[in-house]
Amino acid sequence: MIKRTADKLFRWFCHPDFYPDIKGDLEEIYKDRVDQKRNLTQVRYALDVFLLFRISLLRPIFKNSMIKDTGMFRNYFKISFRNLMKHKGYTAINVIGVAVGLAAFLLINQYIRFERSYDSFHKDPESIYRLTTDQVVDGQLGTRDAMSFNPSGKIITEEIPEVNAHTLTYNIGSQTIRKGESLINEESVKMADEHFINFFGHTVISGDPKTMLEEPNSIVLTESKARFYFGEEDAVGKTLHLYSSFDEDFKVTGVVRDIPLNTHFKFDMLISISSIKDVLEREGWNAFNYYTYLRIDDGTDIAMLEEKLIPIKNKYLNEGSSLFFNLQPIQDIHLNSSMTFEIEESGSKDAINFLEIISIFILVIAWVNYVNLSTAKAIDRAKEVGLRKVIGAGKKQLRMQFLVEAFLINVIGALVALIIAQIAAPAFNSLVDTPILGDLWKDLTFLKLLGLFTVVGTIISGFYPATFLSNFKIISVLKGKFRNSKSGVGLRKGLVVLQFATSIVLIACTLIVIRQVRYMKSMDKGMNTEQVVAFGNPETMPGDDDKYEEMMGVFKDRLLKESSITSVATSSIIPGGESDEIWSTSGGVKIVGLTDRLEATTYIQVVDNQYFELLDISFIDGRNFIKDNLLDDTTAVIVNQAFLDRFNLADQNVLNEKIQFGRDPENDKYNIIGVIKDANRTSLKKSTEPTCYFYDKVQINSLVKLSPKNVAIGLKKIDEIWSEMFPTATLEYSFIDDRFDRLYKEDRRFGAVFSVFSGFALLVAILGLFGLISFIASQRTKEVGVRKVLGASEPHIVGLFYREFIILIGVAALIGVPIVFFGMNSWLDNYAYRINFPWEVIIVAMVVVIICSLITVSARVLKVASLNPANTLKYE
């Protein structure tokens, strides 16, 4: 079998002049090996054939001996170039179409490649998994949390042999650090154990990776942060004072290379997790507030490994626990995760897939334009083809001629595409809010893709026109009968339908994305955040720290004396942040006497008595906290509607019932004094979290409601009072509306990218339509003249041309509507609060396509229709 296949291959590629002699030699060698009873004789024979695949032995590509002459290829390029220069409008439309399509495709491809490359730079990323926690309530999957218990990684590594390493991390949040006389707020700060650096394989510039996070009060900086704080000096051994969570000095024990942008675990500073050793020991298996990563042996069955996690859960929690451990590949986190408590907002796999489809459609439309125009111009090329056949040209030679033409179009288009992409790179980086494009002339991956798709484009766009044109019959062509032929019309109509369908799909999808983002931004959050500014309170106070509460009270009173400020409140969190900014408890919760303990995450927020009033959060039942009522309200709790829904108690009176957290029956019990309507503090992609609110006179963040007429004055007064009372602290405020707006940055970015490239797709499609209708109009010039002589008006003539395209747009809509409906419903299902499918956008998309095509058709046809019939009747 192997020998027979090798013989067929050899006969296919070997030059006929050499074949008999070489085949005889191969047979002799094969026979000798058989006689000697040597192993793998047929495999050796096939290897001999493979080694004979040399240029000098290959059969000619074409039977016609003229093709052997390189001068013939030069002639092909010369004739092709002349044809392109002769028909400059046709050439320009094709080159611009290919260039725009290729540039758009490659720009989107760069962004898609970046999004799909998240966490691929780590050492052996395929073996790294994150330990996650699922909550199963009444047999149904409840929340899926990215966090886990802090001892879990160590225990799993010890008890399961397939797990060979682990590391524990914690997202501690922003920290205030002193630099000279200034206090700097560092946003990207994480905590990690001593295994972290070696586990992920980060490049160490200075320090020992094995010990740099071992000791308490150790801190590791990225290269840029080390340079920011210590200049060109070696940062190792220096100290930084952290105010926010510790108010202690931390010793710099290492410097690592800056972390790439394509990772879910970004940091500028890493604090040793042993710095909170007491907290770790106290929490143990009572709270999953940490991120655990495991390195697993290659070839391990992950499903079987997850089964091994169940006994560990039963052993350290209890068999009745509703929590289950799961493993998530680290490379899936960015695009394939919809868990709560993500370290950063995840990307959207559906969005990336949609963009990929757009990029392909744009490129296909550009190639379709070339095929359409080439086949439409077949009438003009028919006589040329006939004459070439008369003087001896074969089909293969004719195909080569037209493929060379397609090659030139694609090469010129590729060069223009590179220029367009380079010019557009800064705007594209701004659009996607990520500096993923640099000098494209030096980007080998980009250039390889450009070269690859130039070749692919030549084959796809050139093959059919080359085949179509080379099949003309000489007699029909020379007699002029081909001019009335309908050959290729069906294909052209099909390609026009494809272009229209693509345009309708992209326009409709763009409008739906825009509507969903607007819906989330305008939807009632359950709170009024207009003119509410928020900021973190000072971490330390001048003088005695015991006076913190008193000084914050003075600060609040001074603010309230200003006419431009209507209300002031404090809270443990600021609305409009990510869910990981919200405190939570995961050791279980129950309403004593009403429910069993439910092992599910409950969010905790600490507020003062002005918080609900300032944000206009409505009470369904009960009362608010009372200022200075510390005796009663320190053990009081207010719950939201989502909390009651979790326990199926939505219609039940729970006032004065007791809530107990954790597994220990001796834990404190809290009296329910009020129930509020759901107020969503984070993105409306997610449903409102079950939340318990506790009372404290002063918390770490302030919320200030400004008078609508005096916003600027109010901000100025806040700054003046702050500077006077806390001269060493930095005031960094933000409007809560802006914070909510930032939560939808990914969605807006997706919508913007979708809109821009949908516009490109429509532009390329209209460009192709203009070229096609220009050619059709020129071919029907005499017909237009006859119709005018017989009394047809210009609008009537335009209508004759346009009627056909209206039908094609209708067919395109029938194809595009199901794609939009199923595709966008799938995307909308990612949102807890979503719009209903807006059928009217289909109509809008069709109207846009109809108007654009009408303008395009009318612009060209009116020019022909306005010509004097005396001239058009002589047109050939």
Image (cartoon, helix red, strand yellow):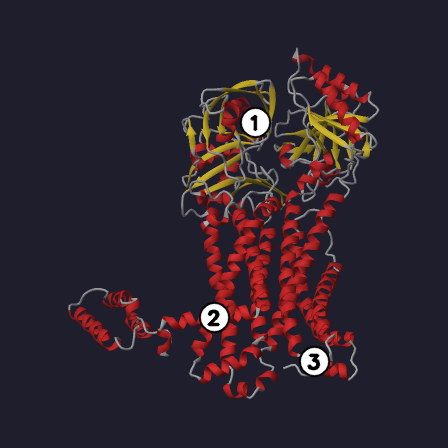
x, y percent for residue 577: 67, 35
x, y percent for residue 223: 48, 30
Mark 3 lies on a secondary structure that is helix
In the rendered structure, are the residues bearing label 1 and label 2 in contact, judged by CB atoms less than 8 Å apart? no
Q: Which mark is residue 871?
A: 3
In front here: 766 or 337? 766
Going from the N terminus, do you reach mark 1 or mark 2 first?
A: 1
Nearer the viewer's eye, disc 1 or disc 2? Answer: 2
Nearer the viewer's eye, disc 3 or disc 2? Answer: 3
Q: Is residue 420 visible?
A: yes
CA gap between label 1 and label 3 equals: 93 Å
Three-letter code, disc 2: Leu
CA gap between label 3 and label 2 equals: 36 Å
Q: Which mark is residue 283?
A: 1
Query: Which quadrant of the view contains residue 366?
Result: bottom right
Nearer the viewer's eye, disc 1 or disc 3? Answer: 3
Residue at the spot of label 2: 403
Against 519, residue 161 (above or below) is: above
Q: Which mark is residue 728?
A: none
Where the N terminus falls, by quadrant?
Answer: bottom left
In the rendered structure, are the residues bearing label 1 and label 3 in contact, judged by CB atoms less than 8 Å apart? no
Going from the N terminus, do you reach mark 1 or mark 3 first?
A: 1
Going from the N terminus, do you reach mark 3 or mark 2 first?
A: 2
Mark 2 lies on a secondary structure that is helix
CA gap between label 1 and label 2 equals: 71 Å
x, y percent for residue 570: 73, 25
Three-letter code, disc 3: Asn
In front here: 297 or 29? 29
Three-letter code, disc 1: Glu
Mark 1 lies on a secondary structure that is helix
Against 633, residue 578 (above or below) is: below
